[in-house]
Structures are given as C-alpha cells and as structure tokens.
Amino acid sequence: MARQTTRWLFGDQLGPHFADDHDGDFLLVESRRVFARKRYHRAKAHLILSAMRHRAAELGDRVRYAQTGTYVEGLGRRTRDLQVIAPTSYAARRFVDGLVEHPDRPRDIERLPARGFVTAQADFARWAEGRDGKRLLMEDFYRDARRRHGVLLEGSSADPEGGRWNLDHENREPPPKGATTLGVDPPPWPEEDEIDAQVRADLDRWEADGDVSFVGRDGPRLFAATHAEAEAVLDHFLAHRLPTFGAHEDAILEGDPWMSHSMLSAPMNLGLLDPLDVVRRAEEVYRSGDAPLASVEGFVRQVMGWRDYVWHLYWHLGPDYRDRNHLQHRRELPGWFADLDGAATRARCLSHTLDGVADRGWVHHIPRLMVLGSYGLQRGWAPQELTDWFHRSFVDGYDWVMVPNVVGMSQHADGGVLATKPYTSGGAYINKMSDHCGSCELKPTVRVGEDACPFTAGYWWFLDRHREELASNHRMARPVQGLGRLKDLAELVDQEETRGSDPP
C-alpha cells in the first residue's frame, strides 16, 4: 500500500480551504525560535499560537503538532511524502527550498501553489505581462479581478454595478460632528478557553526564562483564532457594520477604535477565511438591499483589490524591493516609538495611536498611514526599520503585508512604484479626520514654537529636505511651491533639526 502524503501547514494556513482537498495527515510546527528572533507584540504571539493550537485540536488524530525550538527539529528525520502549500514569505520559501536541496539530507517535498487570495499568482503574472510596460496600477488590477470573478457587475455584462468602478470619493467623510462613537454595534469578542490559558502560561514562562521578549500588552484575546470564530465576526460585520462601513472608513474617533471596520484582517491573514467567499457574501448583502453600494464596493476594494495587489507586488517586485530607500532616510527608530510608549509624547494623535497599538496590536489603516507612517516619513526614519516594526507590532502584520505597504505606500522608499506621491500631511488633515486635536495642547495651525504641531512643522520640514526631488512630482509640485511663502521656514527647519526623533 502506498504511503499517504503528509501536508505541512504553516501558521498562516489554518482555514478549511488549506486542508479540504487533502485526505492524508497534517503537520504543524510551533517553533519557539520564531518568537526569540525578534521582539513581537505579545498579543500577536498569543493569537498565532492560539490559532495554531486550536487548529491542531480540530484536526485531532490527523495532525502531528510539533512544539520545538526550530522548524528543522519539528520536521524530524522525515524525508519523503511531505507536501506544502507555497508559504507567504521569501524567507519561508527559501527555507523549504533549502530542505529540498540540502546536500546531506535532501527532502522530497511536493510544493503546491499559494492559496488564500482571490487572484492566483499565475493570473497576476499574465495580467502584468499584458500591461506592455505600463504601470501596474491597483485600480486596473482591481477592475480586471472584478471582471474575472464577476463581482459587483451589472447583470451578465462587464460593466460595474452602478456605472462606476470606484466610489472612493464617497468614503472619505470625517467623523460626525460632536460624536464620540459611530453608534454601531461593536464586534463580537471571542471567549478564551483552556487553549488560550495554556498559551498565556507558556508565554509567561518563556519570558521568565529569558527565551523571548515582547512589546505591548496581552489582554483578553480580541481577534478570531478559529474558522468558526472568524465566521461569527464576518456574519456580525455583514449584518451590523458593513452598511455604515464606507462613509467614515478614513475617520478616527478616540472613543471608538473599531468604528465600522470588519476586524477580519488578522483572521484572514492567518488563513482562517477564504477571501473570495468573504467578497461573495458582502456582495449578497448589497444585492439584498441591506447595504449601500459605496460601503460594499469600498470593502470589496480592500479585500480583493488592495490586499491581493499588495500580495502580488511583494512577489512581482522581488526580494530586493524591501531594501529600497529612494529618499535616503537612515535615522534609527527611537526607543519611545519602538516600545509603544504613548506617554512619552504630548502629541495626542501619536500618544493615542501608540497606546492603541500597545493595548491591541491593531489600529485601522488611517492611523497606520497618516499618523504612524507619516510621522516616520517626516522624521526620516529608515524604512526597513519601520517595516520591521510594523511587522512585529501588529497582529495582522506579515512580511508580504508590510514590505509593500511600508516601503512603497507609506515611506515612498520605492520612488513611486507603488504610490505616485508620498503619503504625509500637516496637522490640518488629522484635525479634519479625527477628534485628536481638540484635546491636544499642540495646535495644528502652529508651525513654530512650544505649541507647534509636530505634523504641521514636520510636513514642511520634509518638503524642504526633498524639495528638488518632489518638485518634479506633479502631485507635489504645488505644496513644494508653498515653501516660498513661509517667512519662518529657516526657524522651522532649525526647530525640527534640533527635535529630530525626540518625542514632540
């Protein structure tokens, strides 16, 4: 009788769609050294280990769950009948390649194509080749994917539902005036069980033994660690928060960290949900008349547009993309920021956002981009250090997620491959889109002095440092011209050079 193949599942391949086509056994390897290499957020470590151990419990006798120091130890001496779905990082794929090509003990590993994304890598490659040298724009990729999968199209045509592909301009509203919350139901929180208790005890012991060190706080688990929990979060979002998701998706309210966001990025990046199924179910809500098109299109754009686009560019642009530093930013990440010390700064937006990351390992995309990322860009912090920090500090952070998002979108370190302009702003944007400034002792309209907003001053400092580079960018030419109208520019530059990376 032929021996059955064992499928080796990585810790972000935990949903049914990674296992349903396999009749044999499974292998999951929990490597302690992964958490010893870098200083991860404690809640992230908890979530990953909880999800892996819950999946092992679900698979029962069909899985060998190896708790070891390294992946090699977990694999043991097995050299045959092993199968793996393509991992999600260059490091993991190189590791698998090394096992196959090891000169002393090569292993026979069947490698399957990646899954867990709407668009297959082969389909993206064909689309990219058909661009004939034109930029690989997310908008074009997104439209192609919607046509290919028949999502939000009018009838059987290839035309977009409602006559427009992009309803983004309807989804940029500031928070409602005077509101402290959006007034929508919060997400359903998971109930911890004995597996979570054991994870917490193990992490406590590893820390006490000096094996690992974490940042952030590990309160009650907030994110789904099983397929069933993720389904419950998805069901609740579709019924209660998708209808209000669109309009205020870029807004920030201090009293409402979740607002109408789905809270699905972490479980989706663990592989607990099939993103195409998520998209189909969101479309059904629109078809039933229970959510407006702008909200549904905005959510679909995030899942099968941006998420897939970032994943494919990670591979398309190659392993050296992470090292790009077009603006030559080389300042080290300061300790107060790296350690999530919100109390170190008087700037309310920075303090509140860092506290949110410390407490939850998560804030939504606008605090990430326009508070944390924008500040790092203005200060000239090394994009590779910032990428690593985002990867370690966020529960949904993985290499494929953060390299394009930070190097390309946030820090403009690729010189415009991913985004046509640097994403940074003065305090006026934060004042418009959040309620931070009302309780801040620093003033968004002030550039110089004790009560100067570090974002307003930092914005002009950034433009001044890179005025020659940015003057040729059609989206930045006018702001650069505005430097000539600042009578206090020399004083501002001296102020910001002196401040550097010290907390404002």
Image: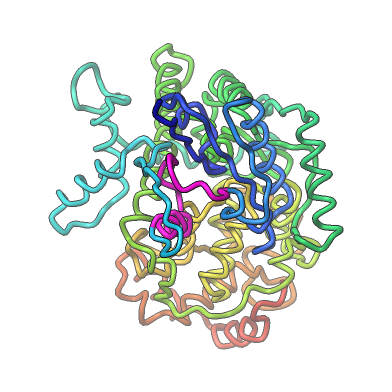
Q: Where residue 48 sits in the image (x, y, percent)?
A: 64, 43
* The C terminus sits in image quarter: bottom right
Q: Is residue 162 visible?
A: no
> Farthest front residue?
1
Q: Is residue 414 left or right of residue 367?
A: left
In the rendered structure, which segment of residues is drawn in magenta?
75-100
Residue 492: horizontal and vertical position, in percent? Answer: 60, 82
Q: Quadrant of residue 274?
A: top left
Rendered location of residue 164, percent (x, y): 28, 32
Farthest residue, direction right: 208
Q: Going by the image, does 136 lie left or right of 5?
A: left
Q: Nearer the viewer, residue 237 or 247?
A: 237
Instruction: Give whichever of 238, 255 is nearer the camera.
Output: 238
Residue in the picture at 45% in, 33% down: 299
Q: Vertically, is 57 above or below 391? A: above
- Residue drawn where x is 37% and y is 59% of the image: 419
Residue at 69% in and 48% down: 45
Q: Quadrant of the N terminus?
A: top left
Q: Nearer the viewer, residue 105 or 129?
A: 105
Left of 356 or right of it: where is 268? left
Farthest residue, direction top: 288
Which residue is pictured at 58% across the width and 40% down the height? 28
**Above or below, comparing residue 71 to residue 480 in the picture:** above
